[in-house]
Image (cartoon, rainbow, N blue to C red):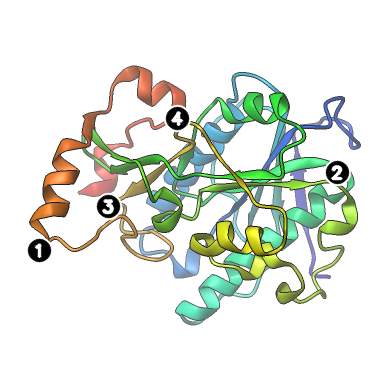
Amino acid sequence: MIGSNLITDGRAPGRFPDQSMLVFIIPLRSRAVSHNWEKVAALCARTVASCCRQSKGESRTFLVCREAPALPVGLKNLTIIAEPFPVPQDKSAQMQDKYRKIQRGLIAARSLAPFFWMKVDSDDCVSNRLAGFAQAHEKSPGWFFRRGWIHEENTRTAYWERQGFFKVCGTSSILACRRPEELPASMDEPLEKFTYLSTPHNELDQVSVRQGTPLWELPFAGAVYCTGTGENWTGSRGVRDYRSKKWMLRRLMNTRFATPRWREEFGVTPLPQSLFS
């Protein structure tokens, strides 16, 4: 096991009173593979704050990283796992690094089972309704997000994706963990051993059906995929074929203003203009 710098919010270890809590796992890329570390850190700080500000229910957020960014003070139920993960040398290794960090976060959360958990990309934001919804549906096998928002950074609008949000964004599913044995116990275990760590997010709904535990469809928009940052994990996942007039018309008809109420629900606070200059 590689060395670890574990930072928590001071809450005593052990189980939460509510066994249907929601655990967020946020893997953060290393400074060495970031185009602009200041921007990466600012995006991550916003994502962490978005996860930590659930309006109802119990939640826990695990940030897994090589270098910890500066974060807002007073965030509740947050654990930072800072370890000297190897710096990935190519695109494929970067994705491997991402899922290894998710694995590390799940190892840290293992003793809290049973719970629901969600992988959150470090530049996306989530609805503050998720933990309360999970608490109200504790028997669910989990959810996939057919609906969600796509927001281009540094703009005042957001695009409403009605049918295939989980196809374009990795922050798009919540999975149930009933027993600690369902999660990795050490970093020595291969990713392939765990379906959710080896299945692409756009196939998870189909795989869950084949396994006999089909995920439910979340009945509201669960997340915001933030594009146009220059630091997205896999490029502009929300950008499709701009040559299609049909798609352009659909996008225009489904674009909405990013209202204060919308920003409040998802925690999509505007970033400093200096980061985009």
- Which-is-in-front pick, marks 3 and 1? 1
Query: In this rendering, does residue 144 appear at all?
Result: yes
- Which-is-in-front pick, marks 2 and 3? 2
The residue carrying mark 4 is 266
- The amino acid at mark 3 is Gly
Snapshot quadrant of residue 100: bottom right
Snapshot quadrant of residue 43: top left
The residue carrying mark 1 is 243
Placement of the N terminus among the 4 image quadrants: bottom right
Q: Residue at x 34, y 60 (%)?
A: 237
Query: In this rendering, does residue 71 appear at all?
Result: no
The crowd level at tag 3 (other Cα within 10 Å; few <14, some 14-19, many 20+) is some
Among numbered discs 2 and 1, the one appearing first in the sequence: 2
Q: Which residue is drawn at 31% across and 58% down?
A: 230
Q: Residue 58 carries which label?
A: none
Among numbered discs 3 and 1, the one appearing first in the sequence: 3
Q: Position of residue 119 (x, y in %)?
A: 60, 51
Q: Where is residue 241 in the image (x, y as percent from the top left)?
A: 18, 63
Q: Do the residues labelled 2 and 4 touch (CB within 8 Å)?
A: no
Q: How far apart are marks 3 and 1 (CA)?
A: 19 Å
The residue carrying mark 3 is 228
Q: Distance between the residues labelled 4 and 3?
A: 18 Å
- The amino acid at mark 4 is Phe
Q: Which residue is drawn at 68% across and 27% down?
A: 76
User: Total number of numbered labels?
Assistant: 4
Q: Which residue is drawn at 89% across and 32% down?
A: 12
Among numbered discs 1 and 4, the one appearing first in the sequence: 1
- Label 2 secondary element: loop
- The amino acid at mark 2 is Ala
